[in-house]
Image (cartoon, grey):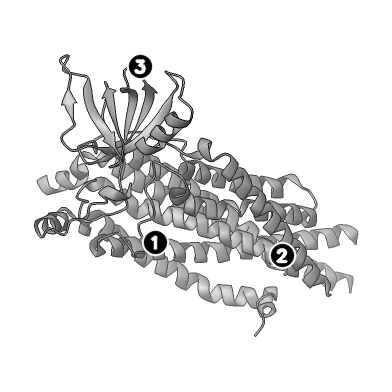
Amino acid sequence: MTRKRRRLYIVGGFMLIFASAAALVLMAFEENIVFFYSPTDLAQQMAKQPMPPNRRLRIGGLVEEGSLGREKDGVTITFRVTDTVEVIPVRFRGLLPDLFREGQGIVAEGSMAADGIFVASEVLAKHDETYMPKEVADALKEAGQWQGKVNEQ
Amino acid sequence: MSMHYFANPTRFTRLAGRIQPWAGGLSAVLLAVGLYLALVAAPADYQQGDTVRIMFVHVPSAWMAMFCYSFLAVASAVALIWKHPLADLAAKASAPIGAGFTFLALVTGSLWGKPMWGTWWVWDARLTSVLILLFLYLGYMALWQAIEDSQKAAKAAAVLALVGAVNVPIIKFSVDWWNTLHQPASVLRMDGPAIHPSMLWPLLIMALAFQAYFVALLLARIRMELNLRRIRALRLAERAS
Amino acid sequence: MESFMQFAEMGGYGGYVWPAFGIVLAVMLFMWIAGMRGWRKSEQVLASLRSSRRQREDISE
């Protein structure tokens, strides 16, 4: 075995071991890396081990069509976050990002209240990976070919 | 023709001298065309309006950030295994360029995130792993500075570069492996690009402009590192005599 | 003039779009100038070192 070949094996083996170690660490810490829970994730989590109330967490999903409402005070808004399987009602008071609208993906940070409503302190908008001019989007919608990534969140 | 053909520094310098002005000129032309397309010709996005124009500098910066690191890691591996005389210098020369592009990807992403997501920064897997990339570049450059003996510095820096290479696939696939605020890939994905051609072309032209810029600047920096090595050798010889 | 104002406004997002393009061009220009200047300077230093060395060799002969 030449010295070059030996060095090649050493470097290759080192990389392989290091990459596997990194993969194991990432898998072990998956729960900490995930930025938000989907409503389904949260429901499963609650069924397994109920979370203490007021624990800070983030939930993410789509703002359900027709769910957006305003409370009597005029500033608090309510809506439901869905992943088309489970639904979480959310209450929020504060500034909304420009992209926030029904059908839009969002991530909300806050905690579960005792009445089962998620009280958010911050709402962020999440957009998908499709980009197109408005005319194309309108034409697609008109032709009934709109696939809007609703189910891919 | 083997890889070692261009390992010869004199031959490399001659070839670099020929490529460098072409790459620089190509980059300038593509950048001018790309900027016009990005700022004027490309349409606004149906959802994101004119903020989508930030994509035309953000995405090429992020691609270059990852490309430079891949180049740095491969050059470091070649240096460690085959002791290629130019590989260490090529890796060293590429680091500041990669750090610059990583910084730009982070800043432009922040300027895009504030109006669209509603935040400058979040600690999701994509953003965090790109920040780690910036630290890897800075650490790599600091290591070269910190170790006096350039042979030892090259070896230590190369090992760090290879360790950090694990981060590159993590950045790329972070948006698929974990829930992130950052959206998944739009161009390099299984089902083909999810960008309308009227926006894809300006993006690709900008990406090409950045790539040509990288080639021209990298060649100049490698030639500088070569000169610095020769200068050091000459000064050492002088002191010895 | 009006269309220029409209262009500069970027649909109300000019405050984000222009700084993004500005910083990209500024950093790329800075890296370019720093890189090219460093390279040219290294060429000069190397050339002067080599010529002074040659001169001394000529004298010593």
- Kindly identify which residue carries mark 2: B79
Q: Residue furthest front?
A: A47
| Residue type beneath disc 1 | Arg
- What's the distance in space between the residues labelled 1 and 3, CA to CA? 42 Å
Q: Which residue is mark 1?
A: B189
Whether pointer 1 and pointer 2 mark residues with C-beta atoms closer than 8 Å, the reply is: no
Q: Residue at x 30, y 62 (%)?
A: B200
Which residue bears the numbered disc 3?
A: A114
Q: Is residue A79 above or below residue B216?
A: above
- How far apart are labels 2 and 3 at the CA level? 61 Å
Chain ID at mark 2: B
Q: Position of residue A151 (x, y in %)?
A: 28, 49
The three-letter amino acid code for the residue at tag 3 is Ala
Residue at (22, 25) in percent of width and height: A78
Element on which disc 3 rests: loop
Residue closest to the eye, A148 or B52: A148
Q: Tell me whether the residue at label 2 lies in contact with that at label 3, contact meaning CB atoms closer than 8 angstroms.
A: no
Measuring from the top left, give residue B80's x and y in whole percent.
Answer: 74, 63
What subunit carries mark 1? Answer: B
Residue B135 makes an appearance in the image: no
Could you tell me which residue is drawn at 37 percent across and 33 percent down? A59
The residue under the point 26% across, 60% down is B199
Front tag of 1 and 3: 3
Q: Is residue A145 left or right of residue B229?
A: left
Observer-side mark, 2 or 3, equals 3
Q: Crowdedness of circle 2 by 10 Å Cα count: few (<14), some, many (20+)?
A: many
